[in-house]
Amino acid sequence: MPAVHQGNGRWPIVLSVPHSGRGKLADLAPLAHGGKAALMALEDPLVDALVEPLVRQGFAAVIAKAPRAAIDCNRALDELDPLCVEGASPPPAGSRAAQGLGLIPSRSHRQPRLWKRPLSRAQLDLRIARGWTPYHDALTGLLGSAAARHGGAILIDCHSMPPRRRGLPRIVLGDRHGTSAAPWVSRLAAQLVKEVGEECGFNHPYAGGHITACHGAPSFDVHALQVEIDRAAYLDASLTAPGPGMGRMRLLFSRLAHGLAEGWMRAAAE
């Protein structure tokens, strides 16, 4: 089950952290080629720690406890791979599931074939019931509460990405090419990133996954924005422990959350 933080209701912001869960890795490790290290290679390490100060301040948040290797809350229920689930149809060529990154990942960068045997349908249904469904139910509830209180809401879906080549932006914002958030939300987010001294890219190579697609509804004043942070910007050289940039990236998420909330309040007052 995810950790659900109701928040204090002060801000029209909901945080989502779907890929930092580390629960039950020891139980999953014997089922995977490469063991625990191969499973951990799928994580967005310590992104939950980046938003922890905001949760303490009273921002609403949903944070996955299940590892991404067990169930990926940023994938649709039909993004299945027969390498992972018995009886699943082969995924469409070029899809994320075909690339090994479906609802149950079939690979990590440490292991081209992750699992020793596929899950039964009953095992898959249990993972969905314990991880995926409560995650999305919680997001729906928190966004609905925020929208009822403030007239709308903004979802910030928080991720990290492998280190980029030099010269490429360390921050990538995704609004699914303008379909999950209004243009002013995306423009303001980019401005806030620049105010922290970072450049940002938009929608490439990450435009947003199932969370932004499912929960972003700009026509109803519910906006969803995916934020990807280069792991080298906040982790140490091993990319597993906090590095010297942790405080700076916490500041970036703080500026995004507070700045988007303030922008919403200004727009609502006009």
Image (tube, grey):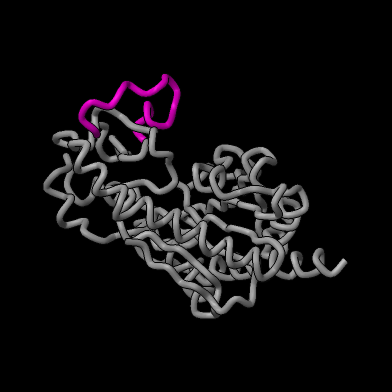
Between residue 178 and residue 8, name the one nearer to us. Answer: 8
On screen, residue 267 above or below 209: below
Q: Is residue 170 visible?
A: no
Q: Position of residue 45 (x, y in %)?
A: 38, 58
Q: Residue furthest left?
A: 30
Which residue corresponds to the image point at 69% horizontal and 41% vertical from the top-left? 178
Q: Quadrant of the N terminus?
A: bottom left
Which residue corresponds to the image point at 51% horizontal and 42% vertical from the top-left? 209
* Image position of 37 (left or right of 105): left
Q: Position of residue 112 (x, y in %)?
A: 27, 32
Between residue 45 and residue 163, name the one nearer to us. Answer: 45
Q: Is residue 94 visible?
A: yes
On screen, residue 145 above or below 39: below
Which residue corresponds to the image point at 50% horizontal and 58% vertical from the top-left? 139
Identify the main secondary structure in magenta: loop
Q: Quadrant of the C terminus?
A: bottom right
* Image position of 125 (left or right of 171): left
Between residue 268 and residue 21, name the one nearer to us. Answer: 268
Q: Position of residue 36 (x, y in %)?
A: 20, 51
Q: Which residues are magenta?
A: 85-101
Is residue 242 on the magenta stretch? no
Which residue corresponds to the image point at 38% horizontal and 31% vertical from the top-left? 97
Q: Position of residue 207 (x, y in %)?
A: 58, 40
